[in-house]
Image: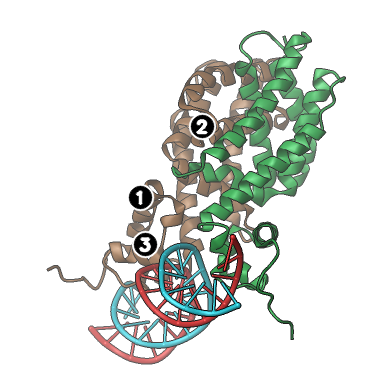
Chain colours: A green, B brown, C cyan, D red
Amino acid sequence: MQTRRYHHGDLRAALLTRAEQTLREKGPGALSLRELARDLGVSHAAPSRHFKDKQALLDALALAGFDRLDETLAASREPGATFADRLGGFVRAYVDFAVANAQLIDLMYTIKHDPAASEALVKAAQRLGAMAEEVVAEGQRAGEVREGPVDSIAIPVFTTLHGFASFAMSRVLSPEEVASGLDAVIAYMLRGCAP
Amino acid sequence: MQTRRYHHGDLRAALLTRAEQTLREKGPGALSLRELARDLGVSHAAPSRHFKDKQALLDALALAGFDRLDETLAASREPGATFADRLGGFVRAYVDFAVANAQLIDLMYTIKHDPAASEALVKAAQRLGAMAEEVVAEGQRAGEVREGPVDSIAIPVFTTLHGFASFAMSRVLSPEEVASGLDAVIAYMLRGCAP
DNA sequence: ACCTGAACACCGTTCAAGT
DNA sequence: ACCTGAACACCGTTCAAGT
């Protein structure tokens, strides 16, 4: 018989943590504010103090996802390496994250189709694009990537990366195709980038 | 004062048509079986005769989307042309469809993350992959595409295509980036395919 | 065969009221 | 400041009953 504490401490953070957990385990359809509140031992109206509506919670979740992906990608950087290694590392880090956080990645990217999507999310996605751009630009500086407008190479590269990750998360590609396909994809990207 | 007819004629088809319309106009969040039934002048329980639950309707919608995309791509085939033209045509047709049917494409591909996703949907997506594979294989036969396992080229190509379409639908790429980026992407794909 | 109407167990959101 | 409890207007799904 546990007494319900009046204050939760940090309900906002608790909501986000729990929400991501059920997103991962039961999918986006199973995400309910009321159930979240129940799980955390709080009244069903309590979440509204921290998120003005359900969409606001989803946005916060997606934004946190972008932040974590950013960190993951930044941590995978290998400054000294060759372009092939740098690109390969970037791609593997992105795909690994996508596979490990399929539902979250999906939330991060599908939210933007909504006309009312928050500007912050679009910016977060564009930050990732900028990171890919940087990898390509450094390759150009080193003479390992063909010359020309960075975007004419960075956009195709990021596009391939995201598409592969997207297929890897879904069942369009089997796990074996993902495993064996990754090297082929990286080789193909390198051909597309070569001078 | 219109009387409600008892039979609807073809309620199933009417439900699908109306559902796709509201999906397009108001997004997936606004799709409700009860509202659909109301719009069609039928009781809220009537749809259950034709779709066992909401997911079944969404699956049918996605499946119809794959069929239409298939037709669109098949219609864009130019058998006599060079590989570059054939690939370019395929890519443009896919991207155009994606931009014109953003919410639908999203539904088509996100549904598969659901563990309970219908096998038919996965197969439909794989049919598209097979079409891309065919374009690449024909390019190989003509000596315009590098040799090796078809998948080692077809998967990267389809992956790039889907990723670009996905970014084009969302707001990661601005409309200008999409317009100007398409040619760059096709050129990059061709470099990745070149012998 | 196809649909209705009522019922059930859920939602998200709002708002006075409590501490 | 933060939370509760009740209220409102919605959902999806099921099932006896109607035609």
> Disc 3 residue type?
Arg
User: Measured along the vertical axis of the image, is residue A36 above or below residue A187?
Assistant: below
User: Measured along the vertical axis of the image, is residue D14 above or below residue A185?
Assistant: below
Which one is earlier in the sequence, the residue at label 1 or at label 2?
A: 1
> Disc 2 residue type?
Ala
Which one is earlier in the sequence, the residue at label 1 or at label 3?
A: 3
Q: Is residue B22 left or right of residue A131?
A: left
The chain to which mark 3 is attached is B
Tell me where residue B101 appears, x and y as whole percent.
Answer: 43, 40
> Disc 1 residue type?
Gln
According to the picture, the residue beneath numbered tag 3 turns out to be B12
Q: Nearer the viewer, mark 2 or mark 3?
A: 2
Residue at image coords 73%, 21%: A135
According to the picture, the residue beneath numbered tag 2 turns out to be B168
Does residue A181 appear in this view? no
Quadrant position of residue A35: bottom right
Rounded to the nearest angstrom, the CA distance separating label 2 from label 3 is: 32 Å
- Regarding mark 2 in the picture, which secondary structure is present there? helix
Tell me where residue A44 appears, x and y as whole percent.
Answer: 56, 71
Rounded to the nearest angstrom, the CA distance separating label 1 from label 3 is: 14 Å
According to the picture, the residue beneath numbered tag 1 turns out to be B21
